[in-house]
Image (cartoon, rainbow, N blue to C red):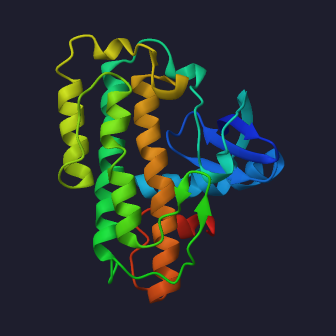
Amino acid sequence: MKIRCVWEHHGQDSLLYSENYAGAFTRGKSRAEALDKMAGEIASYLEWKGYPGEKEMEAEIVQEKDSDLNIGDADSDVLFDSEKGVCSREEYEALKALALKSAGDFLALYTAVPDKGKSVLRPRQTFYGRIPRTALEMYEHTKNVNEYYFSEIGVAADNEGTILECRERGFALLEQQPDFLENKVFQGSYGEEWSLKKLLRRFIWHDRIHARAMYRMAVKTFGPDAVPDIFRFCTAGK
């Protein structure tokens, strides 16, 4: 099975995204390191979706971006070539369902953490600010991109309620636009290009980043059985 990958890099840091499994990604200090992790990431991703993966998986790079952003801190601005052009209703509904499943599973993981304000992780500062340490900080950060992401494609969403509730409302507002499946490319904040397909992929990707961080933090803080492995990260040995 071929895993079509988009390679975004900055200096020695690499982010590798799966083009055909929206939101799946790996990181590495080199392209080779990120590539080595991809088969395990897809196995984890497919387990999360409820579909067993094939035993033989091979990653291939179909697009490359040399980014000015510090992708080592999970920043990104790449628009996939495949995220341009008309979006079919079938593709949209499938990706929306996955983005809502991701939000619901993220909420369930957060709810399972015994103490939302406790963490053994040490504070870490980056150029972009302090990294979320507690479950509450990770949840609020992940939820509160909702308004920002939707605004990049011209939808006036908000961050009220749970991560699932505000995402559902955002999609409802989007669907009121008669031409939303045209999947236009928008010039968003800071010169970044956005489209509907990118928004769908970014939601799942961003959830996955912080779900993994929350799961690891909870295991370190409260013990290996403190929270369920809802996203199946242990399938990939992570």
Q: Is residue 203 above or below residue 214?
A: above
The picture places residue 168, in percent across and down from the top left corner, at: 21, 41
Question: Camera-side residue: 136 or 197?
Answer: 136
Question: Camera-side residue: 98 or 7?
Answer: 7
Quarter of the image holding residue 136? bottom left
Q: Is residue 165 above or below residue 170?
A: below
Quarter of the image holding residue 92? top left
Q: Is residue 199 left or right of residue 158?
A: right
Image quadrant holding the C terminus, namely bottom right
Q: Is residue 25 left or right of residue 45?
A: right
The picture places residue 233, in percent across and down from the top left corner, at: 53, 65
Kindly tell me whether residue 52 is visible in this rendering. no
Q: Is residue 168 above or below residue 232?
A: above
In the rendered image, the residue lying farthest to the bottom is 223
Kindly tell me whether residue 237 is visible in this rendering. yes
Image quadrant holding the N terminus, namely top right
